[in-house]
Image: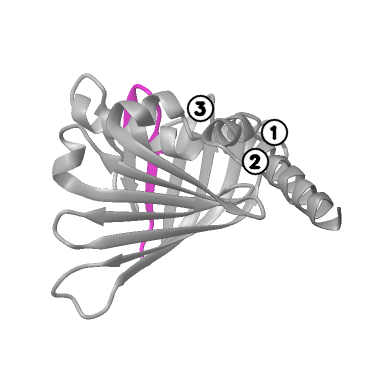
């Protein structure tokens, strides 16, 4: 009898764990409740033939309504502003360089994809990648993206996302054997609305 009760308990606990296993749909719903995310990033790029990795760091702001504001602050200032219709790049004190969706549609495919990564947009990701989602336990997760469509499959072997409450790490492995690792920290979603200063960042 005790053995039967033990087996029943194990079976029950297994079902409970399965019922609460994190899924990609859960992750998308979680990110859907994060209309604004602010974070610090550290980027390290390892390139074949170069002894020391290239490092950079800065701040990012992603808004569901406005797009992505990405400002590298070290080793030099570089600001990128991305939305559905254009990309603005500002290097140091140079005049802004504006690229439109009409002028460079391939660039904006990457732009759309980049925002999909931050928002775990399953529909967009499945158009471009084979997805493998893993619940790592303790609310940790990993999403491995294997490109299946050109030109992504000509550039990357895999893109790996890991996180917890937020996206915490992106690793890009490219066809040349190089690797880019981006770590996000200090994430916060409050206030849920952009401040006046934050809104101005998207006006260029």
**Secondary-structure class at tag 2:** helix
What count of labels does the image hold?
A: 3
**Secondary-structure class at tag 1:** loop
Rendered residue at 13%/74% (across/down): 49
Q: Residues within 10 Å of mark 3 (few under 14, many from 20)?
A: some
Asked whether the beta carbons under mark 1 and mark 3 sit within 8 Å of each other, the answer is no
- Foreground residue, 72 or 51? 51
The tag earlier along the polypeptide, 2 or 3, is 2
User: Would residue 164 appear left or right of 56 to someone viewing this image?
Assistant: right
Rendered residue at 27%/62% (across/down): 179
Q: Is residue 85 magenta?
A: yes
The tag earlier along the polypeptide, 1 or 3, is 3
The tag earlier along the polypeptide, 1 or 2, is 2
Rendered residue at 60%/33% (across/down): 26
Residue 148, image x and y in percent?
A: 22, 35
Residue 113, image x and y in percent?
A: 35, 33
Q: Which residue is mark 3?
A: 66
Q: Which residue is mark 2?
A: 18
Q: Residues within 10 Å of mark 1 (few under 14, many from 20)?
A: few
Q: Which residue is mark 1?
A: 192
Tell me which segment is drawn in magenta.
76-87
Asked whether the beta carbons under mark 2 and mark 3 sit within 8 Å of each other, the answer is no
Asked whether the beta carbons under mark 1 and mark 2 sit within 8 Å of each other, the answer is no
Q: Residue 34: name its quadrant.
A: top right
Rendered residue at 50%/34% (across/down): 119
């Amino acid at each position: 009898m005790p053995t039967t009760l033990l087996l029943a308990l194990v079976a029950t606990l297994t079902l409970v764990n399965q019922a609460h296993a994190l899924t990609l749909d859960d992750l998308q719903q979680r990110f859907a409740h994060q209309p604004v995310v602010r974070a610090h990033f550290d980027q390290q790029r390892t390139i074949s033939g170069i002894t020391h990795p290239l490092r950079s760091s800065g701040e990012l702001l992603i808004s569901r309504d406005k797009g992505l504001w990405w400002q590298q602050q070290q080793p030099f200032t570089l600001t990128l502003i991305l939305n559905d219709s254009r990309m603005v790049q500002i290097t140091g004190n140079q005049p802004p360089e504006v690229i439109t969706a009409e002028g460079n549609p391939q660039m904006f495919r990457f732009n759309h994809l980049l925002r999909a990564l931050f928002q775990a947009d399953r529909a967009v990701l499945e158009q471009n990648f084979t997805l493998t989602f893993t619940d790592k336990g303790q609310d940790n997760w990993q999403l491995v993206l294997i490109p299946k469509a050109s030109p992504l499959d000509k550039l990357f072997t895999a893109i790996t996302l890991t996180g917890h409450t937020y996206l915490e790490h992106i690793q890009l492995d490219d066809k040349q054997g190089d690797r880019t690792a981006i770590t996000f920290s200090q994430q916060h979603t409050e206030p849920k609305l952009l401040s006046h200063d934050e809104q101005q960042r998207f006006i260029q």
